[in-house]
Amino acid sequence: MTYRATLDFLLNDWLDVPALSARNRFSDHSSETFASVFDTCERIAREKFAPFNRLSDTEEPHFDGERVILPPAAHDAARAYVESGMLAAAQDYEVGGMQLPCVIEMAANSFFSKASIGLGGGAMLTSGSANLLMAHGTGLQQAVFAKNEFAGRFFGTMCLSEPQAGSSLSDIVTRATPDGDDALGPRFRLRGNKMWISNGEHELAENIVHLVLAKIPGPDGQLVPGTRGISLFIVPKRLVDDTGALTGERNDVALAGLNHKLGYRGMPNTLLNFGEGKYPVRGGAGAIGYLVGRPGDGLKCMFHMMNEARISVGLGAAMLGYAGYEASLDYARQRPQGRPVAVGGKDASRPQVPIIQHADVRRMLLAQKSYCEGALALTLYCARLVDELHTGGTAEAAEAGLLLDMLTPIAKSWPSEWCLEANSLAIQVLGGYGYTRDYPVEQYWRDNRLNMIHEGTHGIQGLDLLGRKVTMDGGRGLALLASRVAATVARADAVAPLAGHANALAATMAHLERATQAAWSTGVPDEALANATPYLQAFGHTVLAWIWLDVALQAHATTPSDTTRGALQAARYFFHYELPKVPAWLRVVETRDDTCRTMQEGWF
Amino acid sequence: MTYRATLDFLLNDWLDVPALSARNRFSDHSSETFASVFDTCERIAREKFAPFNRLSDTEEPHFDGERVILPPAAHDAARAYVESGMLAAAQDYEVGGMQLPCVIEMAANSFFSKASIGLGGGAMLTSGSANLLMAHGTGLQQAVFAKNEFAGRFFGTMCLSEPQAGSSLSDIVTRATPDGDDALGPRFRLRGNKMWISNGEHELAENIVHLVLAKIPGPDGQLVPGTRGISLFIVPKRLVDDTGALTGERNDVALAGLNHKLGYRGMPNTLLNFGEGKYPVRGGAGAIGYLVGRPGDGLKCMFHMMNEARISVGLGAAMLGYAGYEASLDYARQRPQGRPVAVGGKDASRPQVPIIQHADVRRMLLAQKSYCEGALALTLYCARLVDELHTGGTAEAAEAGLLLDMLTPIAKSWPSEWCLEANSLAIQVLGGYGYTRDYPVEQYWRDNRLNMIHEGTHGIQGLDLLGRKVTMDGGRGLALLASRVAATVARADAVAPLAGHANALAATMAHLERATQAAWSTGVPDEALANATPYLQAFGHTVLAWIWLDVALQAHATTPSDTTRGALQAARYFFHYELPKVPAWLRVVETRDDTCRTMQEGWF
């Protein structure tokens, strides 16, 4: 099967996305316009991204002392992406957008991620940054910054982490001191260091719009501890006037260094110094920034976009997995090696067979398929919920929001973990060749290793899920998810070939709910949360089993084809080989196992 | 705890290795001589290997058209290793050896693997190649080739795979045609290509001794299909006379190319052309080689050393895991980030704590400890069995051989899979920093990925175990292993804190035996072997639980220290978090699940 056929099945048959065109916002659209967006993206990805994926790894960004140098292919890819209009895909017509549903935008972007995650990443970051300004910026901030980002004149970044504050944003120490008023917003001078900033410096666009979290000192000059003191600022690399024209002044933002990564090298990753005086501006040191939203609302503004950012990370991980799946499938079909084992052994005088004929190779391919297509289905489902949140009826939007709260940690973490495993299996299918840089699979594996780290580590996702999401509002989110699972189970129970899966899922879901209660039964956070990561893994596998069962129902109801048969077999793989892993994870959750908590430092 | 303390506990307390000095062969030895070998190796590894591990990765071997160039550090490391005498550690005094037990030799080598697996690997390969000649070569072959390898004048290789024949050695097509008799053995001319040859070309020694598998054509000029037609040859890069002196003639062995690998870059990996006429010798093309053992016995000779080679791979994987464990433990102790969660949330005004105080970080460290120390204990146990095989009484030797047959696939595969997972956890502990090349953990992860591939892939190990080892001789090997497990269970059952573990292990072992029978109950290889890899994983976790329980018994019986407390906690981790994973793997084995077998190629 081709990726496009799978995508079409999931979007058209399973999620019924074309029905969205009945909504006012999408009324110009139809499956034809969606398909034509995909055609364009698929073509650009094939021509401008995929051929340069290895090059983006070997010709890593470097700093010549003044500028960050990227290979010409990176410029070509960025230009092609800008010209496609995808930067504003989901935006209103009036800001130059296409008013596409979020699920179509994400699906369209998946072609780029699959072709070259590093080359594609910067543009999507720009959309995200501009979207944030459309939600929280003033009209002028939107006109000057966001619109120019949508047009590709400016590229964007998100500056959250600092060298001493990665997972713990409450500890950021970048200071923003008032510097007067400005048409672009209350003006501040920022001073501090920001770490892990993707696309923090480059020459791909006229300007770079940094969205920076910083703290405004109190009257005593002290920073407020915790996240309440955090505000959000627009800090352009080059200053602009109220029309968005460059004033010719360079802002006081300096590249302190590039991070040299294991993978994902197409996109520069930087340490930026704000306001250290390397580029004094308008009379002194301090990076000029404009407040977005209200003081203290920085994290809220930033997290407004977090659902979509995290779903995108998950989809990117799924696409890296899928790219490895395609490469290893192709190899397995071509490569002769070994013979089938029959009763009495093998007959060495017979010709070798393509390795796809070996059950263990099929197992490795089927595992990849179940991980990557499952992850794809989950992230598309979440993207569809984002559309419901934005354009659904009041009740539907509220439900979608609540479900997104529950599913986002899974959409981010599950593909990151299991599509990385898929990439490892792809290497294994190729054997020694997979271990060489002559084949692409090792790069996918290296690239994908980032996804369990950025945008909230696995550990953070687990704490978010077990520490916040399943307990919030009296457990209303978990109850809603359970009711959705139960609905799928009820439908599948009536379909003979899927009834066994339905029973297995129902039992696992019940176990998950019991374990959730048991984890919190003593009310002691330490006891519950010590096993938040195994909980995240158990929850993830349960959610994926639900997604697979729902997809299988659709496959069963659709005219049989290779796509539907493949989906049914992948679902079966997931239920037979994967779902049974859940009890081992839940065991430590429900017993509030204290092995890790009681381990003493000296014993390591 | 330091690695050395752990090693000493396992060797001295658990395996009682010093008792070996009661045997004639080891009578000059004692715990003091063993300790002094370790001191030497630890020092050389610290001074000549560890500091150059990153350099061995960044200054990858390259070919200048004539020679393979390695950085000076590789030459220094090789020289220091040669001077340590470790090349002949286990050999007889009369060939310049130290008559050390195998378990001490392997433990001593572990310091090098931990410091720099790529720099260390070539020397160990040389020992292995020379050991093979000591077992199967003629007296003159031993004197001319093996002795010079032990002395470090010559380095060795093993040439098995070909570009079209990796896992399937029966399909090799390198031909050896008779070329007359020679004091060094029946002389042949070899023609063919050998792939994945580690250390196949370099300037680290005066000469390179290739041990090459090839087929001698029958009278009809045809090669015999299958492995029965395979013979073993010594093919020196430079020809030597009967005294081992170089004759000045270059043999017809040419480097066709270097493989550019994902990791493990300290050791060149090559494609070699034998006999293509690039270096015509003694009047023509064809690489001159000398037969070792009898025609057709090539694979038998090669596999004579396979147990030790595969145990070494497992120990190397364990050491890469351990190196990552040490690095991430060190980081977790230093790095402040976040605060404990208390009832009512966190107090952001309090100082951050070192991340080792977070339960999830302790979980990631404890998982690494349980994987790496478990893998270390297993491989040392196997090495101790090798000593029993070679120096034990008749009955003990036979039992040791049978146990080794059962455990070798696990000693090779389990560390390769789980110590790779340990390396991934080490990256995760370091977060973004772990993803950069400024820290060593990403390299360990890349290096370790090779171990599931070389010396027999995971899939091959699974087929070996389920297809051959557990069924051979009416299941005598599995019965023996089960009796050893039962003995440990019985002892642990009597020790209150370990009785729960004992019960869990007994139940899992019984399940494993039932599943083995169920897999073969129809007698159809296809049905049993379709799930050979999940079987390997289940078997591996069961064996490791047994090893951990046995180690825990020793820790419980020893004067309490950080080492024994750490071992008990790591054992507990393994029983609570890992052993419960087994039923999911066994489920598909015992049901002879046909999901993978019945997957059609068109459905992918």
Image (spheres, coloured by chain):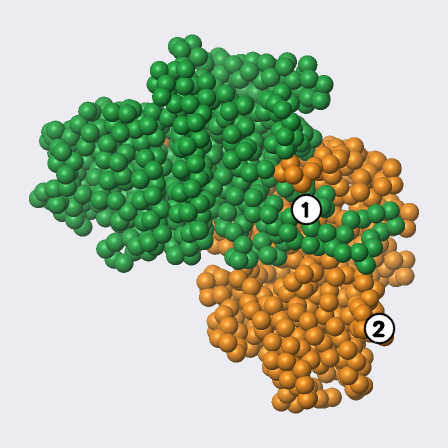
Chain colours: A orange, B green
**Label 2 SS:** loop
Which residue bears the numbered disc 1?
A: B356
Residue A373 is at least partly visible in this image: no
Q: How far across and how far down the image is residue B589, in percent?
A: 59, 26
Q: Chain for mark 1?
A: B
Q: Which residue is mark 2?
A: A220
Q: CA distance from mark 2 to mark 1?
A: 34 Å
Quick check: A555 left or right of B102? right
Which image quarter holds the C terminus of chain A? Answer: top right
Front residue (pair B151, A512) = B151
Within-10-Å neighbours for mark 2: few <14, some 14–19, many 20+: few
Q: Residues within 10 Å of mark 1 (few under 14, many from 20)?
A: many
Image height check: is B455 above or below B269? above
**As drawn, B261 above or below A44:** above
Identify which amino acid the numbered label 2 is placed on: Asp
Quarter of the view holding residue A149:
bottom right
Residue B267: x %, y % from top left: 37, 47
Marking on residue B232: none
Q: Is residue A84 left or right of residue B34?
A: right
Q: Residue A272, position in %: x, y?
A: 62, 71
Residue at 55% over, 16% down: B484
Q: Name the residue furthest front.
A: B32
| Residue shown at 12% from the left, 42% from the top | B247
Q: Position of residue A309 (x, y in %)?
A: 71, 61
Left or right of B199? Residue A573 is right
Tag 2 and tag 1, C-beta contact below 8 Å:
no
Picture residue at 33% right of the left edge, 49% below the top: B76
